[in-house]
Image (cartoon, rainbow, N blue to C red):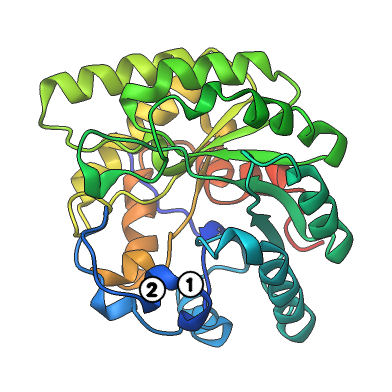
Amino acid sequence: MTEQLYDGDIVDAHHHVWRQADMPWLSGPMVPRIFGPYEPIRRDYLVEEYLEDARASGIGTSVYVQPNWPLDRVVDEVRWIAELHERTGWPMAVVGCADLFSEDAVEVMRTQQALSPLVVGTRLQLHWHERPEFRFADGPEQMKDPVFDRNLASLPDLGWLFELQVFAGQMSDAAALVQAHPQVTFVLVHAGMLVDRDDADELRQWRLGMDRLATLPNVVVKLTGQGTFVHRLDEHLLRFVADEVLDRFGSDRAMFGTNFPVEKLWTSMPELTRAWRRAVSRRTPEEQADVFSRTARRVYGLGPAGA
């Protein structure tokens, strides 16, 4: 099979920038976390450093995704990112956060929207796992919470999407949630968070869940975060996940992102970007353009390349 490395426009559909002091999880005591030891990123990662990484990787457009500021400061977060954009032109779109289990979430999101037209969606991580260090949500049933459901139903009026972060064991509930909100675009973060592809039961459950989500046209998938559980840049894993996702969802429902600076724990951004380019190099030029540019531009309202 012929391989051809993509060399066109690249959108980073998932990255962070941060000031350590804004986030207690980065400035507080070290605890076991999903991505392993994280001392090297317990520091500021400012937009200037991101731009050095991105430009060295051929990335020309980016989408900022919230990295868990305290929920009572999520408006401050949007204000800060809007100031960065005004000063540097980056990022070009923002996925913020709000406490979707709170009765005042819609008011918070409207405030964020009024602060900046860059905000195109929201993320509240719902992933829950038997292993405590893998958990973020308070419990496995949060997707069924009626307040959360009502707040999610407000997103079409805002014109926003929802970034969905769940494990394989939660995908049945996730599919029911997606199906109940057909007007909301759901972006599946980190390709459904496959913990261990060598675990036959885990892999079977993940594939079944991905099959179910692929039948729902309002789901798109991020090819991101594949170092999360292996704590290294594993090109075989990247190609495996890319093939599984593209075969199910198609290239027009898949998009690349760096997940920096988290993945900076084990690789550089140019190395990571090259590895993802190699991972999809057997795909057609049209498919590769979707993964690296067109899908993200459509989903996040970024406009065509060069516009």
Depth check, front residue: 130 or 244? 130
* Mark 2 vs 1: CB contact within 8 A: yes
Which image quadrant is residue 35 in? bottom left
Q: Could one spot residue 124 in this view of the protein?
A: yes
Q: Residue at x 55, y 68 (%)?
A: 59
Q: Is residue 160 above or below residue 52?
A: above
Q: Secondary structure at mark 2?
A: helix
Q: Amino acid at mark 1?
A: Met
Q: Is residue 72 left or right of residue 17?
A: right
Q: How many marks?
A: 2
Q: Secondary structure at mark 1?
A: loop
Q: Residue at x 23, y 38 (%)?
A: 195
Q: Could one spot residue 45 in this view of the protein?
A: no
Q: Badge 2: few (under 14), some or many (20 or more) residues near its Cα, within 10 Å?
A: many
- Across and down, in percent, residue 37 comes to 19, 67
Q: Give the residue number, with chain letter if any, for mark 1.
A: 23
Q: Residue at x 33, y 14 (%)?
A: 208
Which image quadrant is residue 218 in? top right
Q: Give the residue number, with chain letter if any, for mark 2.
A: 26
